[in-house]
Amino acid sequence: PARPGVVASTAVPPDARAGAADLARPAGPARAAAADRVATDALHRRLRALVARAGFGARLEGVPATAADELAQEAATQWTAQFNPRDVDAAAFGELFRGLLA
């Protein structure tokens, strides 16, 4: 499932935040006139609630925390990383994975 922390980490640049806000407004978590940051925060709250309702934890299970650096190195080399709305490298992915695996 989509992890709210992952979605939040990609909505840092203003244009990515605007895109996330555009998703939140018609979907209902935010009012049509809500500022981008308010709408994006509402989207993140909705995602956290849906993940919890589905019975998933906030952290990934079954993957040891010691795997974070290896996963980060692998993620940084994937072609899909170039489409991330924020600049990412192994250090950024490491931070994300350490948060998911803690």
Image (cartoon, helix red, strand yellow):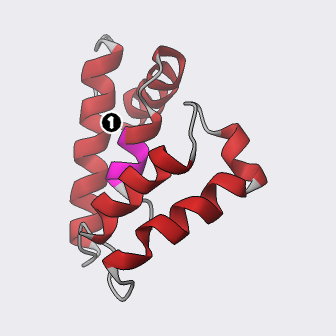
- Vertical relation: 45 (above or below) 101: above
Q: Residue at x 46, y 65 (%)?
A: 69
Q: 84 or 92: nearer the eye?
A: 92
Q: Residue at x 26, y 48 (%)?
A: 46
Q: Is residue 18 left or right of residue 65?
A: right
Q: Which residues are magenta?
A: 4-8
> Could you say where residue 41 lies in the image, as x and y percent from the top left?
25, 32
Determine the image quadrant of residue 78.
Answer: bottom right
- Vertical relation: 55 (above or below) 75: below
> Could you say where residue 30 lies in the image, as x and y percent from the top left?
28, 28
Tally the marks.
1
> Could you say where residue 72 lies in the image, as x and y percent from the top left?
53, 60
Residue with the most extreme bottom position: 62
Q: 23 or 37: nearer the eye?
A: 37
Q: Is residue 25 left or right of residue 46?
A: right
Magenta-drawn stretch, dominant element (helix, strand or loop): helix
Determine the image quadrant of residue 51.
Answer: bottom left
| Residue identified by numbered label 1 | 28
Residue with the most extreme right position: 79
User: Could you tell me which secondary element the residue under label 1 belongs to?
Assistant: loop
Q: Residue at x 64, y 53 (%)?
A: 76
> Could you say where residue 73 lies in the image, as x and y percent from the top left?
59, 61
Q: Residue at x 42, y 68 (%)?
A: 68
Q: Decide whether residue 43 is among the magenta residues.
A: no
Could you tell me the amino acid type at mark 1? Gly
Q: Is residue 31 visible?
A: no
Q: Is residue 97 left or right of residue 78?
A: left
Q: Is residue 56 left or right of residue 71?
A: left
If the image is split into quadrants, where does the N terminus sit?
bottom left
Categorize mark 1 by other alpha carbons within 10 Å: few (<14), some (14-19), many (20+).
few
